[in-house]
Image (cartoon, helix red, strand yellow):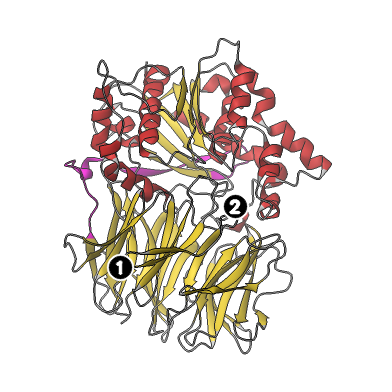
């Protein structure tokens, strides 16, 4: 199952910026040399946190990078964005030059920014109360003034500026059901109008034709199936470019060709992996780019002059960058880049350079560019190191193991960079986002666990993870949910076979869907783990599905299961951890936000209630002002420090 919004794509970068910019406001007023938690935290079981630990961990948490915002509209200059409690746009005049702030954007809960092609304005969306009802604002980059363009009852996201910078198409829940497309001239808010009504599905626009007459968009029936459309914004005439019955085919990130005669799109049509197809608008004929179709194409960007395409391929979790010559129909790899994860491809207006974000185990977020003609790579921005030698940080290794059905499962392992004696304790970190994929990037404060405490961290990409083809991503759907749990059982057996790892000291940890996985592994393999950490974890499936926004509920039922079907409902109840949670005999740490709109806090409270009176050690940390994940820096730091204490107490001792 694939993400439809970009909610998680900037999550780690936003968090990194919180760490450095909000440090001055963290409540660490020592009383007897202990950190004082803020008033919005409910804590139980957690011992006092030494101030010395907080200072030690900040060596890692004050390391951060900043993401690419794009190119300046009129010069070879890169713009970067800081998105946090103190959001801003900065410019970098040449590779390696120190960023210069253009404008600050005040306000909490800013999700992302979308810059007008002419560079005079930007749109940002903001969630002020943790409910994820993102509101659209127009921001003037000249005078710094901001105007609200949407009302408080809708969720407005994924804005796409027209080429002339006069109109914006975006996704909104303003309709009765589903997510529809709306059109607005931001300088004339009264111009807002419905462009395409969705019915029950999720509509997302991606690109405008060069004459600004057409918009190409996708209609998502589920997270793994979509249709491809083009609409004439003047006449309202829609043209379907995909098959009428494409319920098992995925289309995403379409872009118009320079001449407007066709559309490039990522799709797994008639393929196990995602490829790039060119669709002729006149003939509807598909032509696939000449790529070796072994791995998913995860991103691409057509150059403004229409001659080149920058392409990212996800090869076993690592990004490979290619430039594709449209005329000769040939790709070439770009050498000189370290192994890591690339995202955010952005061409400058003259098509001479393509910029991108780069993340790795020693780079929270660097920014590079590649020259279209020579393939030369330049680094424009390097992550702030806080005086640490980032090259000494642990390097991830790709590992593989056989699961119960003979299928090979893979993941990444981070080992301490310095030598420790004896077998090492292990934390299995289970990714959130039900179809997510762990990529070998920077692991922030978890570096303290690995480097300073000698813990080995394993990040598995169990079945259902994206990046390994159409079949693999659907292996855990519906009645096969427990097969993903068995993949972790096989990993526990793999750990036991390793001479350097201690099978008696294994902890599982996960957030959101990863929290469900952590709970399930804890219950099914209770004798093979020593503790668990569950953040915003799903403990009861039916209530979670019923709690989903009505605009998104049908979208997820193909993955989770349809709770309205008696057989599916019985299965969802059977696999819900809450109904067997008292079987757990190992320490558990529950972390949850009281305003969580995805997984209500009652899911964690039910576990506390069920375990009350048992002899099992249960810690809990609830953020009264937090949603799905802790975003307030003060609370986040307390959470991270408490996780370290829990790890020391129940894994390392």
Residue at the image position 35 percent from the left and 23 percent from the top: 423
Say if residue 445 shows up in the picture: yes
Residue at the image position 40 percent from the left and 39 percent from the top: 632
**Label 2 packing within 10 angstroms: few (<14), some (14-19), many (20+):** many
* Location of residue 5 in the rendering, given as x and y in whole percent from the top left corner: 53, 57
Q: Quadrant of the C terminus?
A: top left
* Location of residue 548 in the rendering, given as x and y in whole percent from the top left corner: 65, 46
In the rendered image, which residue does mark 1 sit on?
Answer: 143
Say if residue 267 shows up in the picture: no
Q: As displayed, is residue 195 above or below residue 494?
A: below
Q: As displayed, is residue 416 above or below residue 340?
A: above
Query: Is residue 407 found inside the magenta-colored segment of the image?
Result: yes
Which corner quadrant of the image does residue 75 belong to? bottom left
404 or 94, nearer to the observer: 94
Q: Which residues are magenta?
A: 381-408
* Location of residue 416 in the rendering, given as x and y in whole percent from the top left corner: 29, 33
In the rendered image, which residue does mark 2 sit on?
Answer: 473
Q: Secondary structure at mark 2?
A: helix
Query: Is residue 299 found inside the magenta-colored segment of the image?
Result: no
Direction from residue 381 to residue 276 in the image, left or right: right
Disc number for residue 250: none
Residue at the image position 41 percent from the left and 62 percent from the top: 113
Spatial CA span between label 2 and label 1: 47 Å
Direction from residue 489 to residue 362 in the image, left or right: left
Q: Secondary structure at mark 1?
A: loop
| Cβ atoms under marks 2 and 1 closer than 8 Å | no
* Location of residue 342 in the rendering, given as x and y in whole percent from the top left corner: 37, 59
């Amino acid at each position: 199952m694939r993400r439809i919004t970009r909610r998680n794509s900037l999550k780690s970068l936003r968090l990194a910026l919180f760490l450095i910019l909000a440090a001055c406001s963290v409540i660490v007023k020592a009383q007897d040399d202990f950190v004082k938690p803020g008033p919005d935290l409910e804590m139980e079981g957690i011992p006092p946190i030494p101030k010395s630990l907080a200072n030690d961990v900040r060596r890692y948490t004050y390391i951060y990078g900043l993401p690419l915002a794009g190119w300046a509209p009129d010069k070879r200059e890169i713009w970067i964005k800081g998105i946090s409690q103190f959001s801003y746009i900065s410019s970098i005049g040449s590779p390696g030059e120190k960023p210069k702030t253009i404008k600050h954007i005040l306000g909490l809960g800013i999700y992302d920014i979308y810059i007008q092609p002419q560079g005079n304005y930007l749109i940002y969306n903001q969630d002020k109360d943790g409910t994820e009802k993102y509101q659209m604002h127009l921001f003037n980059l000249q005078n710094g003034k901001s105007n609200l363009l949407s009302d408080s009852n809708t969720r407005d996201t994924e804005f796409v500026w027209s080429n002339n910078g006069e109109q914006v198409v975006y996704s909104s829940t303003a309709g009765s059901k589903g997510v529809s497309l709306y059109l607005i001239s931001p300088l004339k808010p009264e111009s807002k109008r419905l462009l395409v009504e969705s019915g029950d599905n999720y509509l997302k626009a991606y690109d405008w034709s060069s004459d600004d007459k057409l918009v190409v968009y996708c209609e998502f029936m589920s997270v793994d199936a979509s249709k491809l459309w083009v609409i004439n914004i003047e006449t309202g005439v829609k043209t379907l470019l995909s098959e009428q019955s494409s319920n098992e085919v995925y289309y995403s990130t379409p872009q118009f060709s320079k001449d407007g005669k066709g559309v490039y799109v990522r799709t797994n049509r008639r393929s196990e992996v995602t490829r790039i197809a060119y669709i002729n608008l006149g003939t509807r004929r598909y032509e696939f780019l000449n790529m070796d179709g072994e791995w998913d194409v995860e991103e691409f960007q057509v150059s403004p002059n229409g001659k080149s395409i920058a392409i990212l391929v996800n090869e076993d979790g690592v990004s490979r960058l290619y430039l594709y010559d449209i005329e000769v129909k040939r790709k070439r790899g770009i050498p000189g880049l370290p192994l890591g994860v690339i995202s955010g491809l952005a061409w400058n207006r003259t098509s001479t350079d393509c910029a991108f974000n780069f993340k790795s185990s020693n780079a929270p977020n660097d920014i590079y560019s590649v020259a279209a003609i020579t393939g030369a790579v330049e680094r424009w921005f390097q992550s702030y190191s806080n005086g640490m030698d980032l090259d000494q940080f642990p390097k991830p290794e790709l590992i593989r193991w056989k699961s119960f059905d003979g299928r090979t499962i893979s993941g990444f392992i981070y080992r301490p960079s310095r030598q420790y004696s004896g077998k090492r304790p292990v934390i299995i970190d289970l990714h959130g986002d039900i179809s997510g994929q762990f990529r070998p990037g920077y692991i922030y404060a978890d570096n303290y666990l690995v480097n300073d405490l000698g813990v080995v961290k394993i990040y598995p990409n169990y079945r259902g993870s994206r990046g390994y083809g159409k079949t693999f991503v659907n292996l855990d759907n519906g009645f096969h949910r427990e097969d993903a749990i068995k993949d972790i059982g096989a990993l526990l057996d793999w750990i036991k076979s390793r001479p350097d790892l201690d099978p008696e000291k294994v902890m599982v940890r996960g957030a959101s869907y990863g929290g469900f996985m952590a709970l399930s592994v804890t219950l099914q393999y209770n004798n093979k783990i020593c503790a668990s950490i569950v953040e915003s974890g799903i403990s009861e499936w039916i209530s979670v599905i019923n709690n989903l926004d009505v605009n998104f509920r049908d979208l997820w039922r193909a993955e989770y299961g349809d709770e309205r079907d008696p057989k599916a409902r019985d299965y969802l109840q059977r696999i819900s951890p809450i109904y067997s949670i008292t079987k757990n005999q190992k320490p558990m740490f529950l972390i949850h936000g009281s305003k969580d709109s995805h997984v209500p806090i009652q899911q964690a409270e039910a576990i506390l209630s069920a375990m009350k009176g048992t002899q099992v050690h249960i810690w809990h940390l609830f953020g009264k002002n937090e949603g799905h994940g802790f975003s307030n820096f003060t609370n986040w730091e307390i959470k991270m420090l408490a996780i370290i204490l829990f790890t020391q107490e129940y894994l390392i001792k």
